[in-house]
């Protein structure tokens, strides 16, 4: 076990990092941390395994965890590789979850800001016997988000 491990950030690769960052600011209240990043170097090439790559973007503090909480890192590469569309059941990264007071209102806010519905808002009993209301939605670039509220 790595005894000094600490969760730091989740990275999203964007087609338009500024627009995606604005969505997370306006909908979830994420706050920009530190300066914008703009990298292009031999070290970046070596670290990514790519050639002549540029990387721009920003870190955003996720809500609800204070000034030292984890961030959402939204980056855009100078050249993007095509990938499969996100799916709730695809192995690997699945979604980012946000606890909200009102799932229906949060669902509407995501849609009003360019997001899309993935499924319906549902309520069900959790494995520990509490009622959870939740849904999957997608941000404007198709990344899947879960909105959840426990009774």
Image: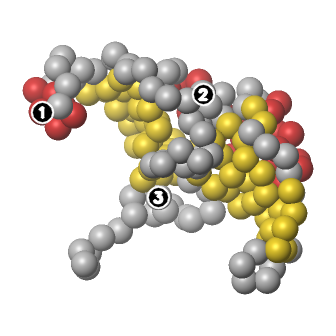
Distance CA(mark 3)–CA(mark 2): 21 Å
Whether residue 22 is situated above or below residue 64 in the rendered picture:
above
What secondary structure is found at the residue carrying circle 2?
loop
Which mark is on residue 70? 3
N-term-proximal mark, 1 vs 3: 1
Residue sitting nearer the eye, 137 or 85: 85
Q: Looking at the rendering, in which quadrant would you find the C terminus?
A: bottom right
Question: Residue 127: image x %, image y %?
Answer: 72, 78
Left or right: 150 in relation to 73 = right
- At x 63% / y 55%, what residue is drawn? 97
- Residue at 85% from the left image edge and 46% from the top image edge: 120
Q: Earlier in the sequence, mark 3 or mark 2?
A: 3
Q: Which residue is mark 2?
A: 141
Q: Quadrant of residue 11?
A: top left
- Residue beneath label 1, please? 46
Instruction: Decide: few, some or many residues near mark 3? Use Cα within 10 Å; few <14, some 14-19, many ≥20.
Output: some
Rendered position, 143 above or below 10: above
Where is residue 112, by image quadrant?
A: top right
Residue plotted at (67% across, 56% down): 98
Vertical placement of residue 18 versus 29, above or below: above
Is residue 133 depicted above or below 53 in this figure? below
Q: Are marks 1 and 3 in contact (CB under 8 Å)?
A: no
* Camera-side mark, 3 or 2: 2
Tell me which label, 2 or 1, sits earlier in the chain.
1
Nearer to us of marks 1 and 3 is 1
């Amino acid at each position: 076990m790595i005894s000094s491990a600490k969760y730091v950030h989740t990275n999203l690769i964007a087609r338009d990092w500024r627009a995606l960052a604005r969505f997370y600011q306006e909908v979830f209240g994420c706050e920009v941390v530190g300066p914008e990043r703009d990298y292009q170097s031999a070290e970046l090439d070596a670290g990514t395994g790519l050639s002549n790559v540029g990387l721009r973007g920003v870190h955003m503090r996720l809500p609800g965890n204070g000034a030292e909480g984890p961030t959402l890192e939204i980056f855009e590469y100078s050249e993007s590789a095509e990938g499969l569309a996100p799916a709730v059941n695809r192995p690997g990264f699945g979604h980012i979850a946000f606890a909200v007071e009102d799932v229906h209102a949060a669902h509407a806010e995501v849609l009003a800001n360019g997001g899309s519905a993935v499924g319906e808002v549902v309520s069900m009993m959790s494995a520990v016997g509490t009622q959870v209301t939740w849904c999957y939605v997608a941000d404007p670039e198709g990344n899947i988000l879960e909105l959840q509220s426990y009774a």
